[in-house]
């Protein structure tokens, strides 16, 4: 059981990640407000049973998808640019609306959830969370964004969002086309992205875009106290 210090400081409760049941130390958790989380593959029935025996409850599924590099450039508009902090500041309070329905962090207050995703984007602009934060603009107004990072073989999408006033215009497709081109130009094998199992709209959008399901994992939570 490993304490996640950044998460603990941000959420204001002690957050731990559990990789195997043998490291669960309930005595260590006495008199604490805590969240112990475990991410377990859907096929690991043994670990799931052990978690449930210890009082963990199912929280959410994590669906990871992969798209092979198509080895071609896709024509896209020229409305993209690397986001700056000043580009993002006017939208500081929009992120719960974008992510609050499906987030696994909805055990926390909405203002904290909003701040979490805003902080994610800020840190990605700074290169501290993801490597890049790219915005798509219509008439000089931010319409959507995507963050990503790269490893040796592929890109990993972090956040993709379309602002409410610009939905239904195919902007998410343009954002995905943008990272397709980045993967091609970088000579990478493909692109990975993860989303929640309940987010059927996102799952269908990725599948239509050529992504296939790579893995399914479940989040399990053990909590104590009030999360304010």
Image (cartoon, rainbow, N blue to C red):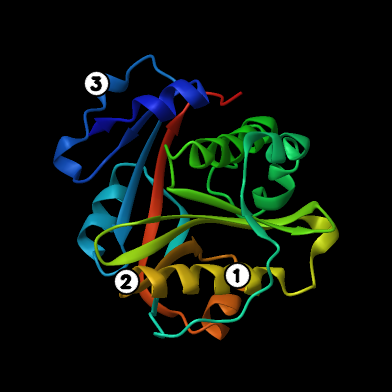
What is the spatial separation of the Cα atoms under label 3 and label 2, in whole angstroms? Answer: 46 Å
Give the percent coordinates (x, y) of residue 122: 56, 36
| Front residue (pair 61, 128) | 128
- Is disc 3 in contact with disc 1, using a CB cutoff of under 8 Å? no
* The N terminus lies in quadrant: top left
Disc 3 residue crowd, few under 14, some 14–19, many 20+, Cα 10 Å: few
Give the percent coordinates (x, y) of residue 203: 55, 73
Q: Is residue 8 above or below residue 143?
A: above
Q: Is residue 101 above or below residue 13?
A: below
Is residue 14 shown to the viewer in this render?
no
Is residue 131 shown to the viewer in this render?
yes
Q: Label 2 belongs to which residue?
A: 188
What is the spatial separation of the Cα atoms under label 3 and label 1, in whole angstroms? Answer: 40 Å
Q: Label 1 belongs to which residue?
A: 202
Q: Label 3 belongs to which residue?
A: 27
In the drawing, what numbered circle is on residue 226?
none
What is the spatial separation of the Cα atoms under label 1 and label 2, in whole angstroms? Answer: 23 Å
Instruction: Give the mark toward the camera: 1 or 2.
Output: 2
């Amino acid at each position: 059981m490993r304490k996640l210090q950044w998460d603990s400081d941000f959420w204001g409760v002690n957050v731990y990640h559990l990789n195997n049941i043998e490291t669960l130390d309930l005595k260590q958790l006495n008199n604490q407000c805590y969240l112990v989380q475990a991410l377990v593959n859907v096929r690991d029935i043994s670990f799931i049973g052990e978690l449930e025996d210890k009082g963990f409850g199912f929280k959410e599924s994590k669906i990871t998808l992969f798209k092979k590099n198509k080895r071609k450039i896709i024509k896209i508009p020229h409305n993209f640019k690397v986001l700056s902090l000043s580009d993002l500041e006017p939208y500081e309070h929009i992120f719960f609306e974008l992510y609050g329905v499906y987030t696994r962090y909805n055990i926390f207050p909405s203002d904290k959830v909003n701040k979490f995703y805003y902080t994610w984007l800020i840190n990605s602009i700074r290169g501290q969370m993801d490597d890049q934060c790219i915005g798509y603009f219509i008439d000089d107004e931010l319409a959507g964004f995507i963050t990503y990072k790269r490893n040796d073989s592929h890109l990993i999408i972090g956040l993709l969002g379309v602002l409410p006033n610009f939905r239904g215009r195919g902007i998410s497709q343009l954002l995905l086309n943008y990272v397709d081109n980045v993967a091609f130009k970088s000579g990478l094998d493909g692109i990975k992205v993860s989303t929640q199992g309940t987010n059927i709209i996102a799952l269908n959008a990725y599948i239509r875009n050529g992504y296939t399901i790579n893995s399914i994992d479940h989040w399990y939570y053990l909590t104590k106290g009030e999360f304010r």
